[in-house]
Structure formats: structure tokens, C-alpha cells
Amino acid sequence: MASRKLIRPDAELTREIGSRAVRRKQAPPDQTNAEENYYLKQMAAKTQMVVVLNNDEEVIGAIEWYDRGAIKLTRTKGPNLLIPKTSIRYLFKEEERRRRARRGG
């Protein structure tokens, strides 16, 4: 059996390889802007939305504006509301409710 010889790379090659190895895949962004795009689309279309609050109360209206912590809902029946996002469980389009009712589900 032949003896194996250990080959050591020179210092320059080691530095080049080391600097390449440090480059890592960047972390994904903190925000995707999906929420912003959804709100903007619904605001432009003046879509009637059903907002389900944490206490199971439902409020219907169009989103007039939003910011990081709240949305303003313009309603035809009743006063306009400024709703903190922490109070919202979820929201959906009112037409979704009508479609589901027509199907009988």
C-alpha cells in the first residue's frame, strides 16, 4: 500500500475560499407588503368588508384608510369606525357571505 501525501493549500487560496464561504443566503424580508396590497385593492374598489372582532361581533363597511395599528371603516348604516387591528380576528369580503348563502352552505 502506498503512503498518502498530505497536500496543504497555500495561504492565498485559503483566504479566497474562506471569503466565499462567508457569503450566506440573505434572510427573507420582515415585511412582504401583502397586507398593504390587499387593503389598497379593497379601498380602490370600495369593497364592502365584514370585520369579525375578537368578541365575535361583526361590522360591515368599506375600508377608508389604514395604518400600522388600525383601520377606518366607512359604514352606510351607523357611524364610521376606527378599529384597532389588535381587536380584529379576521376580515373577508361581504360578497363571500352572499355566495356561500346562495350555495346553501
Image: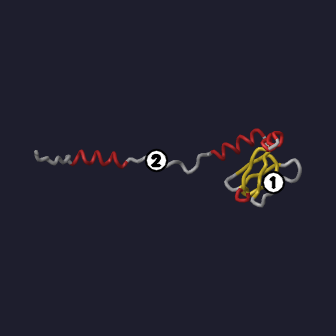
69 on left or right of 19? right
- Please identify the residue farthest to the left as the structure is shown: 2
Q: Position of residue 28 (x, y in %)?
A: 51, 48
- Residue for point 58% across, 49% down: 31
Query: Which amino acid is tagged 2?
Result: Gln
Front residue of 55 and 35: 55
Nearest to N terminus: mark 2 or mark 1: 2
- Residue for point 75% across, 43% down: 43
Query: Which amino acid is tagged 1?
Result: Glu
Front residue of 46 and 2: 2
Crowding at dot 2, Cα within 10 Å, few <14 / some 14-19 / many 20+, comes out as few
- Residue for point 27% across, 48% down: 15
Indicate how the structure is coloured in the image.
secondary structure
Q: Position of residue 23 (x, y in %)?
A: 38, 47
- Please identify the residue farthest to the right as the structure is shown: 77
Foreground disc of the pair 2, 1: 1
The N terminus sits in image quarter = top left
Crowding at dot 1, Cα within 10 Å, few <14 / some 14-19 / many 20+, comes out as some
Residue of label 1: 58
Q: Secondary structure at mark 1?
A: strand
Residue of label 2: 26
Question: What is the spatial separation of the Cα atoms under label 2 and label 1, in whole angstroms?
Answer: 41 Å
Q: Secondary structure at mark 2?
A: loop
- Asked which quadrant contains residue 16, the reply is top left
Front residue of 21 and 101: 101
Q: Position of residue 25 (x, y in %)?
A: 43, 46
- Please identify the residue farthest to the front as the structure is shown: 1
Do callouts 2 and 1 mark residues in contact (Cβ within 8 Å)? no
The C terminus sits in image quarter = top right
- Residue for point 81% across, 54% down: 58
65 on left or right of 79? left
